[in-house]
Amino acid sequence: MKKSRTALVAVAATVALALAGCSSQNATPSPASDGEGEASVFTDVSVIVPAGPGGGWDQTGRAMSKVLTDDDILGSAAVTNVDGAGGTVGLAQLANQKDPATLMVMGLVMVGAIETNSSAVRLEDTTPIARLTEEPLVVVVPEDSEYDTLEDLVEDIVDKGQEVTVTGGSAGGADHILAGLLLEAAGVEGADIPSKLNYTPNSGGGEAVSLLVGDKVSAGISGVGEFLQYIEDGSMRALAVSSEEPVESLADVPTITDAGYDVVLTNWRGVVAPGGISGADRDELERIVTEMHDSDGWTAELESKGWADAFLVGDEFDAFLEENISDVTGTLKNIGLI
């Protein structure tokens, strides 16, 4: 697969007890409508971030919480981090969640992690609510790196293999996929990519930043928003972005395609709810997220973080998710990651 232009579009017992303690009292019935049963009204929701602090999921969950409460859409939207295994620990926690007023941040990273971790719980076991954003990835190196271009980095990985270390989000996530696609575009056979690629996964963006700023790895891959401040202050140098067109906040950084590798990849993020909730509960969560999306506060969050609006809800998100799971699984197989 030389071309990748499909937008494949990265728990403690106390946490378990905290989540289990959320009761369905957040859902209060209102009068029945259209003969379809009682409509649900949620005054509060719980937001699960299935990763550590600092990464894209954490930024998304906290941006949601801020907008939902600042714009008086909800009384509260408490965020809980449930770290581990590309989000599949949080996914398993969601499977046991009894409170329908619960949203879990997820996205492309989780789609891949489910496959690479052979997760018993899958996204098909949840209730899809909405796709929210998509974001290009950026390939960076420490400020004093020997690599001046993306070609310098990729050719050194091809030549030296495991001697060159690359860090990013969880195994099988968007960052890992992009690294594999770069090697494939450079002519490495899919079956040989795992032996060539020395990839160090992280559960949160802060860990990858520490490795890069501390000059502990050769290069890193993550969403533009997660690395932007370190690129701007000179702690990292950006080699290329994974979007079709240059990124406004990194106008001088070439796309991967312009750098010589025919690869385009965007990382999407969204939210799901526990599986098996009622149609009325799903409708209410979709209403809440749609109101958030339509608010000035959310528009400001998109602009400040450089996220593209990729909102999908209802049947459209269901269809997108089904197709994305199939696409990601195929890509992971093609580049030898599963």
Image (spheres, helix red, strand yellow):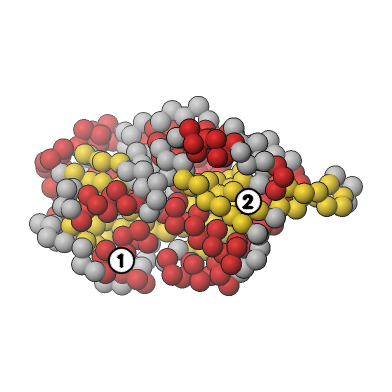
Quadrant location of the C terminus in the rendered image: top left
Q: Which mark is residue 213?
A: none
Q: Amino acid at mark 1?
A: Gln
Q: Is residue 160 left or right of residue 199?
A: left
Mark 2 element type: strand
Say if 211 sits above or below 237 in the image: above
Determine whether the residue tagged by mark 1 lies in a helix, strand or loop: helix
Q: Nearer the viewer, residue 130 or 8?
A: 130
- Picture layout, residue 203 above or below residue 245: above
Work out whether residue 305 can be spotted. yes
x and y percentages locating residue 131 in the rendered image: 55, 53
Q: Which residue is mark 2?
A: 45
Q: Earlier in the sequence, mark 2 or mark 1?
A: 2
Instruction: Name which residue lies at 57% across and 40% down.
Output: 19
Residue at x 36% of width, y 43% of height: 203
The percent coordinates of residue 267 (x first, y second) are 42, 53
Q: Residue at x 59, y 67 (%)?
A: 70
